[in-house]
Every structure is written in structure tokens, then in C-alpha cells.
Image (cartoon, helix red, strand yellow):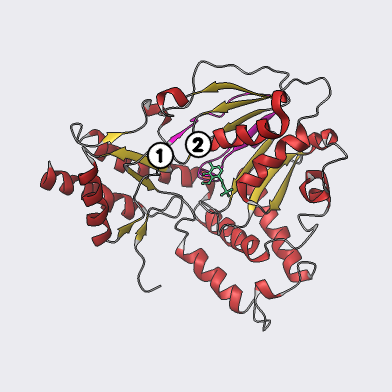
Amino acid sequence: MSHRVFNFSAGPATLPEEVLEASAAALVDYQGKGFGIAECSHRGKEFDQVLDEATERCRRLLSIPESHDVLYLQGGATQLFSTLPMNFLAAEGLGPAEYVVGGEWSKKAAQAAQGAHGDQVRVIASSEESGFDRPPTGWSASANASYLHVCSNETVHGHRLAEWPEHPNLFVDASSEMMSRPHPVDRTAVIYAGAQKNLGPSGVTLAIIRRDLYSRIPKSVPKIFNFKVLSEAKSCLNTPPTFGIYFLLESFRWLERQGGLEAIEKRNTEKAGLIYDAIDSSGGYYTGTVADHSSRSHMNVTFRLPNEDFTERFIKGAAQEAMVALKGYRSVGGIRASIYNAMPAEGCRTLAQFMRSFQAANG
Ligand code: PMP
């Protein structure tokens, strides 16, 4: 590809060049067949093979046990967190669902559930009072909650749950860290992620669901939102986002070529370390927005400069050096560098160097 900048967008986000090229080629002509992968039936053998290979690779990458299904859905993570309660709340003998709210996204998930189901949903901890500058601490969930919902990486605020909590029915929004490290699927009931950060274009949501939950689904749930029906239809109840799913397959192939999720995690830790070092060695010129360093995200690095004027100049200066999309989320301000799997270490190194030279010139 001719000219690629370092793109720090939070999502849709930078994707691996090899994956883009392979997907682009398949879009024009799939395996020399004279049609592209977005131009054939979702019920034909070509797409069926794509689905099978994607699922096989996804299972291998994440060590997904037989007890769990892999689903490719639409409507984004927002539809997912809106449909989870209608499927899985009415569980016999279990109490209200419990939500831990550590940022904008877990708050939205809790609001969606509360809006539709009222007192069957409980927020058991929130860090909103301290401006979501950390994940909530000091909480414990009821073992008999219908489920415990957490967001494992808060995209806006730049913190993560370094360890996922223990719960018999743990539901995790992993949208902004999916496959950036190994995930404990065997002790998680539901994991879901919009694809547009680590995996592919927006329009596909990857959901991994423990099958025993299906017995909870009320008859009133429309088929198109019913996870059991969707699973039985192999994600093809209606026409799925075929090209997006193909793109995921190329991402999974790429991840396996990188050595799998342990290798990716090591690389991501080093990448994030380059930028956090630049913050921590700046003598307070740059301030990280996350209070508890052990919760700093390895995917979204958030920090502030001494004032708004410097922030604007930083963003403009970085753009002149081919680093784009560094502006923080509107409610947080400052800088957010999103450094998902596809961001090369060179991008993080270039940003860290720019931070040092910007400080030297504007200190
Ligand atoms: N959860 C998290 C953690 C997110 O970062 C986002 C999107 N930024 C969402 C949910 C919502 O995703 P979507 O736009 O796919 O509905």
C-alpha cells in the first residue's frame, strides 16, 4: 500500500495491512472464481467454508470449549448488550442481573438493561463519582445473580480489568480488547465484541455464548434476537454481514501467523509501555487519566497536557508527522492513543519520541 499513516483511532481503527490486502483481493475475485466474496450466497458452499474456517480458527485462538458457541451477529456491541437481558434475565431461582459500571460503555449497557427491565437489574458498583478514572473496586457480586456484567476495557477512559472477575455467569463486553490477549473463556458465560477495533470493519459482532444459557430464553423473544435460534441457524437466520465475516477470517489467520494471543499480548504490553514510559518520565508534563496504574489499558492510552492550547498544538504537530486521530473522547478531553493489535510498535515508538520532543519545545 502506498501511504499509511499511524492511525490512533479508537474505532473503526487501523487494521493489519496484510489482512486489508487479502480481504480486498477476495472482494474483487474470490479464489479465481470470477466473483468476489461479497457477491455469493450466504447459503452457498464458498461462504459456508468461510464460516467453518473462521469458527475453527476463533476456537483455536481463544481455546473455546465445546460448551460455548461462536456467533457472528449484527447491530454492534450496543445491540448485543441490549438483547442480553431479554434473553437471559428470566432465570428461575436466580436474582437480578448485576452490573459493574466503570465507564461510558458499561454505563450504557446498564442503562439499556435498566430501561427495559427496571428492578431486575442492579448496578452494584460505579466509579462515576471520580470521573471514571479507574475501574470500581471493593465490590462483590451475588453468586445467584442472573449474571454479572462487566466491560473489560473502557475505551473512553483508558482502563481495563487486568484480571476478569470470577462469577458463575460472567458476561463481558470485550469490544476494545477482543483477542489482544488470551481470555478465560472457560470461566465466562458470554463474551462479545463489535469487530471494529481489533478484528475488522464495523457491522459484525463476535459473540461467544455458553450454551446452557439458552434454556433461559423466554418464548416472547423475537427470533432475530434469540441467541438459541441464531446459533441453530449458524449465524445465518437472515443474511449475515458476509464480507465482514470474511475479514474476520483473514484477521484470525493473521493472528495465528503472529504466534497466537500470547505472542500478541507480549507485543501489546511492550507497545503500551513505550507510551506510558513517556508519560511517567515527563516529570508531570503529561498526566495519565487513570488513577490506578495497574488498571491502565494496553489498548487505549489516555493522557492530558498542561492546557487546552498545548493539546491542540500536540494534535496538529502529530498530524504533521503522520500520526492521526489522537484527540480524546469528548467527555474526557486530552489525548487518546488507541493502539490495537494492528498498530505497529514503530507507531508507539514514534508517538513516544514526539511526546518527548514536544515537551522539550513547549515545556
Ligand atoms: N462497548 C465498548 C467497550 C465500546 O468501545 C463500544 C464502541 N466504542 C461499544 C460497546 C459500542 O459498540 P457499537 O458501536 O458496535 O455498538
Q: Which residue is mark 1?
A: 331
**Residue 202 against residue 333 in the figure, above or below:** below
Q: Looking at the image, do the residues carrying marks 2 and 1 touch, with CB atoms under 8 Å apart?
A: yes
For the residue labelled by badge 1, is the local secondary structure a helix, a strand or a loop? Answer: loop
Compared across the picture, whether 141 is left or right of 341 comes to right
Q: Which residue is mark 2?
A: 104
The percent position of residue 188, horizontal first and vertical second, equals 66, 33
Residue farthest to the right, as pictured: 219
The percent position of residue 110, horizontal first and vertical second, equals 61, 32
Q: Specify whether residue 176 is painted magenta.
A: yes
Which of the two residues, 181 or 306, is positioned nearer the viewer here? 306
Whether residue 77 appears in this view of the structure is yes
Compared across the picture, whether 288 is left or right of 158 comes to left
**Residue 262 against residue 284 in the figure, above or below:** below
For the residue labelled by badge 2, is the local secondary structure a helix, a strand or a loop? Answer: helix
Q: Which residues are magenta?
A: 159-188
Image quadrant for the C terminus?
Answer: top left
What is the quadrant of residue 24 in the picture? bottom right
Instruction: Name the magenta segment's main secondary structure.
Output: loop
Image quadrant for the N terminus?
Answer: bottom left
Which of the two residues, 141 or 179, is positioned nearer the viewer here? 141
Please report the residue visible at 67 percent of the width from the left and 54 percent of the height from the top.
Answer: 74
Q: Quadrant of ligand 1?
A: top right
Please report the residue visible at 40 percent of the width from the left and 40 percent of the height from the top.
Answer: 269
Counting other residues with Cα less than 10 Å from the Cα at mark 1, is it few (<14), some (14-19), or many (20 or more)?
few
